[in-house]
Image (cartoon, helix red, strand yellow):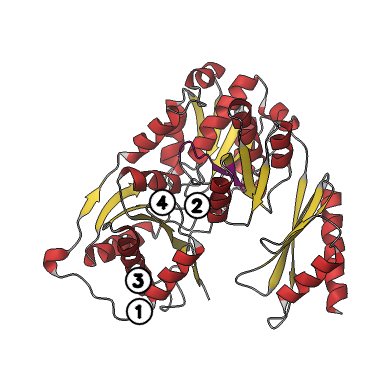
Amino acid sequence: MTLIKSISGIRGIIGGKPGDGLTPADILKFTAAFGKWVVANSGKNKIVIGRDARISGEMVRNLVAGTLQSIGIDVVDLGLSTTPTVEVAVTDENAGGGIIITASHNPKQWNALKLLNEKGEFINDADGRLVLEMAEDTDLVFSDVNSLGTLTYNESYLQKHIDKILALPLVNVEAVRNAKFKVAIDCVNSSGGIYVPALLKALGVETVYELYCKPDGHFPHNPEPLPENLVALSQEVLSKKADLGIAVDPDVDRLCFVCEDGTMFGEEYTLVAVADYVLKNTPGNTVSNLSSTRALRDVTELAGQTYNASAVGEVNVVTKMKENKAVIGGEGNGGIIYPELHYGRDALVGIALFLTHLAQSGKTISALRSSYPNYFISKNKITLTPEMDIDGLLKKVEEKYKNQPYSTIDGLKIEFDKQWVHLRRSNTEPIIRIYSEGSSETVADSLANKIIADIKEILQ
C-alpha cells in the first residue's frame, strides 16, 4: 500500500489504482473534502496553494487547483514555493487554509498534500480525522458554472517571506555581510534552489557555491538531509574552502549544516544553536519533541529558562509551544519554529538566525558546535507480529522502570540521568521504534540494546 492517509494530509507514490497509489481520483477526493472543511471551519472560500519542484508537482497542482475551483473556492497559487512560505501566505492573504504539494523528504516518486488551517498551521488530529471522514462522503455536490472559484497566480511571496525575515530584530544583516562568509549549498534540485540563494544574497552573502539548485525535481540523491546523503556538499565545502555548508529538504522546512572541515554539524544541533542565540537575546521557554536531543534542555536551563517536551509531530510541538509561551522550538530533524515570524518549521528563518549567531560569535562553525553538550542518538526498531498488544507491552516496560522519570504522552520515554530512551509504536507497521541518547554512540547503543533485551524477555 503506497497511499498513506493521516491527520496531516495524504501522501503516496504517484500512479497505480485509486486507493492504492496517489492517483488523480484520490487527489480530487481529498482536495474536495479539505475544501469543504475549510469553508465550514473558517467561513472563507479562499485557499493558498504552493508546490515543491518534484516531477509530479505540476500535474498534482493542476488537479488540486481545478478541484478547489469546481467547488466554488478561490485559489491563490504561489507556484514553486516552500512549506513555510505557504504558511506565511495563508494569513497574509486572509485565506481559510492552505495546501502544500510536497512529499517533504520522500524520494521523487512520492507526492503529498499537506494541509493548513486559517492560521497557516497544520491541522490538528480532530480536524484531520474529520477531513478523512468527509473524503469518503459520496454526496459531494460541485458548483455550477456561475459559482466556480477563481484562480490567481501570486509569485510575490518569495520576496515577502525574505522581507519578513530581514525585518526580525534578531536577524543582523550587517553582521552577516561583514563576516564575508563563503557558503556552499545543496538544495536537492527543488524549491530551495530558488529561495536559499535569494535569501543569502539578501543577507549580504556574496560567495555562494551552488550544488543542485536547478528546480527540476530530479533529486541527485536521497533528498532527506542526513549525513550519508550530503557527501557531495561536504566535499564542496572542503574543495572550495567554504566557511560552512547548508542543506535543505525539497520543501525547505528542514535545515542542517556542514562544518568548514567537512564534518556534519548534526541536524539535531540546528535547533540547539538557533535556540542558544534566541535565548541569549530573548528570555523564554523552549520546546522540542520527545525524540529530540537533550542538548536543547541543557542550553535552555543554562539560560535560566524552562524546557518542555511534546509528542512527536509538528502540530504537537506548536501546541506545546503555545501552552508554554516558548520563544523558540522545533524538532531534532532540523526543523526550526520561530513564533516571532510564524508557527511552522522554517529553514529560511533558521538560516538567517544561525548566520547571525555565527557571525556575532566570531567562531568557526566547528568551534560553535564544540561549545554545546555532546550527545549521540541511536535509532532502532523491533518488529512484532501484527496481533501483538503493543500498548500492553509498553505498559510492562513502564512498570519495570517505574522508579525512573518517565513520560507517556507519546509512547514511553524513560530518563536515566542525562540519558534517555523513547519507545513509540509505528502508525503504519507492527513495529516499535526505539530512540536512545547518551554521551557517546556506544552508550546510546548500549541503552537501546538493554531495552530491546527487556522487550524480548517480556515477550517470552
**Whole-percent x, y for residue 334 in the image:** 60, 45
Badge count: 4
Q: Nearer the viewer, mark 3 or mark 1?
A: 1
Sequence-first disc among 4 and 2:
4
Q: Residues within 10 Å of mark 3 (few under 14, many from 20)?
A: some
Q: Residue at x 85, y 73 (%)?
A: 456
Q: CA distance from mark 4 to mark 1?
A: 32 Å
Identify whether 223 is placed above or below 392: above
* Of residues 261 and 271, the one drawn nearer to the viewer in this rendering: 271
Q: Which image quarter holds the C terminus? A: bottom right
- Could you say whether the residue bearing mark 2 is in a helix, strand or loop? loop
Q: Nearer the viewer, mark 1 or mark 2?
A: 1
Sequence-first disc among 3 and 1:
3
Badge number at residue 53: 4
**Whole-percent x, y for residue 75 in the image:** 26, 55
The residue under label 1 is 137
In contact (CB < 8 Å): disc 3 and disc 1: no
Q: Nearer the viewer, mark 3 or mark 4?
A: 3
Sequence-first disc among 4 and 1:
4
The residue under label 3 is 24
Q: CA distance from mark 4 to mark 2?
A: 10 Å
Residue range of the region highlighted in magenta in the rendering: 329-341
Q: CA distance from mark 3 to mark 4?
A: 18 Å
